[in-house]
Image: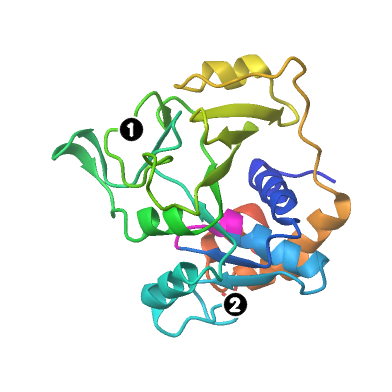
């Protein structure tokens, strides 16, 4: 069964969520890939995983928007969350504000909202980037919306655990503040990852290939999950799942 890069990323994130310590996953705005992964894992675990998606109605338990999800995270009741950015650097810092010499940015984006707060309090934060390029994965972000690590003595139960891109999967070591390559996605090479990454990262002696999505998972994505996520991201579903579940 054929699949695209978004479907592969969904399945990679799903494998990261199949973890006994992860019982409640929350998904923020502009996150159709993580949202699909969370719903997929909920489906294949027969509802063991609680998946809360901040937009929409069917999978959104929060009646007070951002304030309620922040309160839930602060109480330690969210085990995994997802963050991305217009820039991500080798220290897992993310930029959601703008590019250029702040405050005179060249291009302005919506902003950080609660990214820094969620980065600090949610135990397992998974970074994701559907575009793996030196434009996104930079040596140093132009503005730190949310820091990857904190100084000693700062209370921080949360932080980055992994980075999933269209080319590879990386883990993050907080102690040395570096990413390490875990696997390269099918159809891509280590050289391609190196050429398109602006920061240095650790490379294992043996570079493995990311497992391909299971046929069963792809079927579920292109049926039940596609129909559910279409409520929030109809354009994404039109592009990735061929319009499944999108009302015209």
Q: In the displayed orientation, state which residue is furthest to the bottom.
A: 63
Q: In the displayed orientation, state which residue is furthest to the front.
A: 153
Point out residue 119 in the picture as x, y percentages from the top left corner. Answer: 44, 53
Residue 225 visible somewhere in the drawing: yes
Please say if 132 is above or below 11. Answer: above
Point out residue 160 in the picture as x, y percentages from the top left corner. Answer: 52, 44
Name the residue that disc number 1 marks. Answer: 141
**30 or 79, nearer to the observer:** 79
Q: Is residue 64 magenta?
A: no
Look at the numbered discs 2 and 1 and tell me whether their residues touch, using CB distance below 8 Å.
no
Point out residue 232 in the picture as x, y percentages from the top left corner. Answer: 53, 70
Point out residue 191 in the picture as x, y percentages from the top left corner. Answer: 63, 14
Would residue 66 appear left or right of 180 to someone viewing this image? left
Q: How is the image coloured?
A: rainbow
Residue 245 visible somewhere in the drawing: no
Q: Which mark is residue 59?
A: 2
Q: Is residue 31 magenta?
A: yes
At horizontal 30% and vertical 41% (from top left) the residue drawn is 144
Magenta-drawn segment:
29-34
The answer to which image quadrant residue 244 occupies is bottom right
């Amino acid at each position: 069964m054929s699949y695209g890069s978004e479907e592969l990323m969904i399945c990679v994130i799903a494998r990261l969520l199949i973890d006994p310590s992860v019982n409640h996953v929350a998904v923020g705005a502009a996150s159709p890939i993580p949202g699909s992964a969370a719903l997929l894992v909920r489906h294949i675990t027969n509802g063991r995983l609680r998946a809360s998606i901040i937009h929409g109605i069917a999978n959104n338990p929060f009646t007070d928007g951002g304030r309620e999800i922040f309160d839930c995270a602060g109480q330690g009741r969210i085990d995994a969350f997802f963050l991305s950015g217009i820039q991500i650097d080798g220290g897992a810092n993310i930029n959601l504000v703008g590019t250029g010499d702040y405050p005179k940015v060249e291009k302005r984006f919506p902003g950080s909202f609660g990214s820094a707060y969620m980065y600090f309090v949610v135990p397992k934060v998974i970074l994701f980037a559907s575009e793996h390029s030196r434009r996104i994965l930079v040596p140093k972000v132009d503005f730190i919306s949310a820091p990857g690590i904190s100084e000693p003595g700062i209370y921080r139960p949360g932080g980055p655990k992994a980075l999933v891109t269209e080319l590879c999967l990386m883990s993050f070591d907080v102690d040395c503040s570096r990413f390490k390559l875990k696997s390269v996605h099918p159809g891509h090479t280590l050289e391609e990852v190196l050429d398109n990454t602006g920061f240095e990262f650790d490379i294992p002696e043996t570079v493995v290939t990311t497992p391909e999505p299971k046929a069963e998972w792809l079927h579920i994505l292109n049926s039940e999950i596609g129909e559910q996520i279409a409520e929030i991201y109809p354009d994404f579903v039109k592009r990735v799942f061929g319009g499944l579940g999108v009302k015209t």
